[in-house]
Amino acid sequence: MPVNNGNKSLSQIMYMCLGFFGIQFGWALQMSNMSTIYARLGAKEDQIPLLWLAAPVTGLLVQPLVGYFSDRTWCRLGRRRPYFLGGAIFSALALVLMPQASAIWMAVIALWVLDTSVNVSMEPFRAFVGDILPENQRKTGYAMQSVMIGAGAVIASSLPFILASLGVSTEAPAGTIPPSVRYSFYIGAIVLLAAILATIKTTPEYPPADMEAFKAMKKQAFNPLKALKEMGSAFITMPSTMRRLAVVQFFTWAAFMIMWVYFSVGIASAVFNAVPGTPEYEAASNWAGTCFSVYNGVAFFTAFLLIWLTTKYSAKYIPIVCLLIGALGLGSVGLTLFGVTFNKYMLFGPMVCVGVAWSSILAMPYALLSNSIPAEKMGFYMGVFNFFIVIPQICVNLFFGPIMKHLLGGSAIAAVGVGGISMLIAALFMFRVEDKTVKAD
């Protein structure tokens, strides 16, 4: 277990989490734009989920391995920070390359590079909070991560709309990406790299308390077969809190993946009555980004409330309430299946509800988990926990396209409503989770 110097000030916790602002800036650009980028390049709606496979597959493979290796790393730059930096450099390069794509296969390759690199940076950040902060401040630390995620995402999601409002063109020849989206990705590359460099500069890491024991463990660090064996055994020996949270994560992240994949193309057809290649479709794409910025903005402000709520209430019951609110939001969008109509401004209401759920799910599961796993394996278990984020996303990408096509009549917006049902199930399973967190001072 690393040595730490006790409680941190709120400003120290903020700088510690600043890198997540940059990571989420790049991630949100992807989430709010990839479906319409694929559509612009000629992909059909039922093909889009398969084209999203990069994010969950790379998370499944990369995060546990990075967690395993980072637990066994100590160098001049520290334990987790070398991974922050390496991932940030390649993520920035991928963000620059992505809007240059002129064919689907080029966009797919750029997405795989981007998601692999983001995962290299993201996983150690979860363990970083557990390393640096004492148990009584971890809920605050993960809530601050939620603040940074919300801030990065709200700006990034609305950036194409902002640039369009400033006069940057939203038009482009068929099979190419418009300037408003291209420049957004370039800006994202700069922001991501700068934010992670700021965290590296301002937040030192602490060496292991028992350096001799750490050196013995480090000798086995780069043994991928051993890492894979430990990952397999982790499923059998994981603490009960982690096992029960895994079920919650599965249904929660299935709901969000459905929303990310289908919301933008869904509102294009159901609200804007638009098809790819038309000005109305570009307007729908930009409005979807604005809606995503709304839910991320709500998540940003909710995260401040969570920082206070974690000092008063259980980290178990906070996400139950938030998930129920999110289920109401996504479910209401699906009411279009029954003839309910929305104009574009009415979409803000469901996005407010989604933002409340998003803020909670980015913080509370990690607060509950961090106090139920061995400190010396914090990075490894955080990586294994990521399985239960990416497996549901893979399931959605592989199987939900045919479900949407054959059972939902090809209605992408009705698919979003199914996400609401999934989030409701997650809230119900949250009642089974035991809270072992320590009250913040």
Image (cartoon, rainbow, N blue to C red):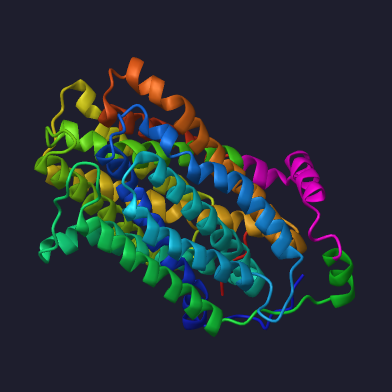
**Coordinates of residue 315 in the picture (x, y in percent):** 53, 55
The one of 316 and 382 positioned closer to us in this rendering: 382
Looking at the image, residue 17 sits to the left or right of residue 163; the answer is: right
Looking at the image, residue 94 sits to the left or right of residue 276; the answer is: right
Whether residue 227 is in magenta: the answer is yes
Counting labels gives 0
**Residue in view at x 65 percent, y 79 percent:** 77
The answer to whether 37 is drawn above or below residue 198 in the figure is above
**Coordinates of residue 122 in the picture (x, y in percent):** 54, 60
**Residue in view at x 66 percent, y 58 percent:** 66
Quadrant in the picture for residue 188:
bottom left
Looking at the image, residue 130 sits to the left or right of residue 12; the answer is: right
**Coordinates of residue 335 in the picture (x, y in percent):** 23, 28
Where is the C terminus found, in terms of image quarters? bottom right
**Residue in view at x 63 percent, y 40 percent:** 244
Q: Is residue 318 visible?
A: no
The answer to whether 117 is drawn above or below residue 332 in the figure is below
Q: Which residues are magenta?
A: 219-244
